[in-house]
Image (cartoon, helix red, strand yellow):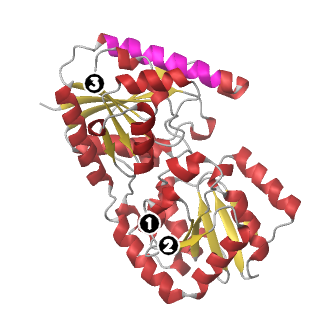
Amino acid sequence: MSKKLIYLTHARIPSEKTPAPFILKTCAGFVQEGWDVELWAARRHNPWFAGVDPFREAGVSPSFPIMQIPVIDWMRGVGRAGFICMIVAYNVAAAVRLWRRRHEPGLVVYAHDLRDIVLPVFIGVPVVCEIHDFFESSVGFVNRIVLSRVGGLVVTNSIKAKILHEKYGIAPERLLIQQNAVSVEEFDITVSRAEARERLGLPPDVRIIMYTGHLYEWKGVYTLAASAEFLPDAMYLYFIGGTSHDRDLLRKFVDKRQLPRIVFLDHQPHGMVPLYLRAADVVVLPNTAKAAVSREETSPVKLFEYLASGRPIVASDLPSIREIVSENEVCFATPDDARDFARAITECVEDPLGAQKRGEAAEALARTHRWDARAKNISAFLRRIDSKA
């Protein structure tokens, strides 16, 4: 008999943000491991993705249902207060539904955020939470309550595992360190760089330095933009993705500084990312060292995609990044130092043999971080936690 897993998340599904495809791929992996999965996502308005098939957008099979949990969707109007209202409403609605099913044999609850299980941890059903960025709530008692009652925690690096053990007394047997993953086969494309540029309408005769993903300040995108001042004239920076608001903020920074040769492209469907990466000469992960979320907490899905693409990578020299890669796979640059990023990018471009060697090592490393292997490890952990509940 397959076991039932209910995945709780307040994230918008589908969405332009990373958690949406990540959650869908995680659920698909659990299905492959024999779980009967239901995804309970908050019913939140997202006009940019109206009518979009979430499974097609994430590139996964529709092998599980997505249940829409009603919430108070006021975030666009009242900011943080709206977010709190949404989280409270999600917890109440999810807890009520779980209460009705609390005696269902073999039921396990899985979550992507501590804030989504403040009430569900009291239902009497085994709960496991996956810990990602911003994993500590700003409300201290939420952390203490949830972490004391949750059955197990999946953490994406050893830094967070150490913090959880030392600060909250989480026993090692309640922790699974499991890094993020990538669909390697999606990036295993035979298209050449020239062909990719032709398909995408990108210039064939310049060096393209590419960043894909969100444009939050802690991602270090302002440092990368500032590096344009120190790059050779033949190199162009391409920023692909982000919300229109964050894109406008970064564009204003670029205009104010009169930074040259910077191109902005809108968010692209997830399935187009491999083609864009193939078109690049260098891809960049410029995370800042000024924020704990970047320095210690993150395990960037973007980095795993970069690795799978086999393109030359320049990355910030941070503990969170060093946990995943070394000089064998990437060229490191000093975080928050635009001039040093320009130096590392230029050296990457001017050393094609070294770049090729690191690219081959990167692809090999990516193959050790597959979604199916990740799901297998977490599934074994879930069954162990459930057996002790």
Residue at the image point whose x is 66% and y is 57% from the top: 220
Mark 1 touches mark 3? (CB < 8 Å): no
Residue 145: where, in percent of width, then height?
A: 44, 20
- Magenta-drawn stretch, dominant element (helix, strand or loop): helix
Tag 2 secondary structure: loop
In the picture, measured across the screen, residue 261 lies left or right of residue 114, that is right
In the picture, measured across the screen, residue 329 lies left or right of residue 6, that is right
Give the magenta range. 82-99
* Residue type, numbered disc 1: Val
Q: Which residue is mark 3?
A: 126
- Indicate whether 124 appears above or below 202: above
Q: Which residue is mark 1?
A: 325
In the picture, measured across the screen, residue 218 lies left or right of residue 117, that is right
- Gap in Å between the C-alphas at discs 1 and 3? 34 Å
* Location of residue 233 by image quarter: bottom right
- Depth check: give the residue in front, 8 or 38: 8
Disc 2: CA contacts within 10 A as few (<14), some (14-19) or many (>=20): many
Disc 1: CA contacts within 10 A as few (<14), some (14-19) or many (>=20): many
**Residue 57 seen in the current view:** yes
Nearer the N terminus, badge 1 or badge 3?
3
- Indicate whether 193 appears above or below 321: below
* Magenta-span inclusion, residue 326: no
Residue at the image point whose x is 33% and y is 14% from the top: 123
Tag 1 secondary structure: loop
* Residue type, numbered disc 2: Val
Q: Which residue is mark 2?
A: 330
Tag 3 secondary structure: loop
Give the position of the C terminus as an image quadrant: top left
Residue at the image point whose x is 18% and y is 27% from the top: 388
**Residue 62 seen in the current view:** no
